[in-house]
Image (cartoon, grey):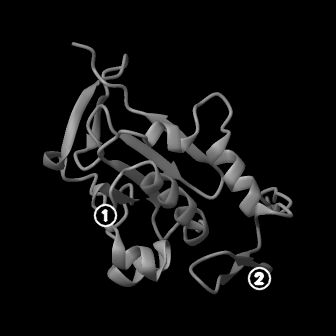
Amino acid sequence: MTVMKIDLAFGKTGITVDLPEGFHYRVLEARTATPLPDWQSALDAALDHPIGAPPLAELARGKPSAAISVCDITRPAPNRLTLPPVLRRLEQAGIPREGITILIATGLHRAATAGEIREICGEDIAATYRVVNHDARDLSSHRHLGTTRSGTPVHIDERLPEPGSISRSVSSSRISCSATPVAEN
């Protein structure tokens, strides 16, 4: 006998699950944020006047390349909306389009298919920028950055820029901006 039916966000259409009796269930729901009345202006402000960091265009000026990491298909994010202003600022700052890499942050998930890349980035961006999948299992494609205090090795995808370039992470909740420092000789 079923005690409760619950609809879960799963895939594109969701899934209904029948929960058996004999257990105490409680539905936990994530808090939702109120949509911004003008998300485009808010995004422009975040890119041009970030808290505690220089504007994206200033960070990008004079850099030869940039990398942007975006979530894979399992994390719904409005990349089609957030990537164009980021890419525009990088190019206006002088980074050539061929110097920009968009890295699909798959974690340990499978690589995104060509169709999923178009869905993640949008048709135009997928067709005109270098978009690649991260592969955490292939350590030969990573640089070793060091070891944490607890002894965990830290590696970074080799396709992310070397020191002196710029990298960004774009997600539905934040845009993280930090330049990789240039080593002083």
Count of number-bearing discs: 2
Residue 59: image x %, image y %? 47, 37
Q: Residue at x 25, y 50 (%)?
A: 159
Task: Answer with the quarter of the image where residue 116 lies.
Answer: bottom left
Above-or-below relation of 129 to 163: below
Q: Secondary structure at mark 2?
A: strand
Above-or-below relation of 13 to 136: below
Q: Residue furthest left?
A: 140
Position of 72 compared to 84: left or right? left
Residue 4: image x %, image y %? 80, 77
Q: Residue at x 33, y 66 (%)?
A: 131
Q: 184 or 110, which lies in front?
A: 184
Residue of label 1: 133
Residue 122: image x %, image y %? 49, 78
Q: Residue at x 43, y 42 (%)?
A: 60
Q: Report whether residue 64 is seen.
A: yes
Q: 180 or 27, which lies in front?
A: 180
Marks 2 and 1, how far apart in space? 42 Å
Q: Secondary structure at mark 1?
A: strand
Q: Residue at x 30, y 64 (%)?
A: 132
Q: 179 or 74, which lies in front?
A: 179
Q: Report whether residue 25 is seen.
A: no
Residue 68: image x %, image y %? 42, 53
The residue type indicated by label 1 comes to Asn
Q: 92 or 85, which lies in front?
A: 92
The residue type indicated by label 2 comes to Thr
What numbered label is drawn on residue 2? 2
Tell me if label 2 and label 1 are in contact, CB under 8 Å.
no
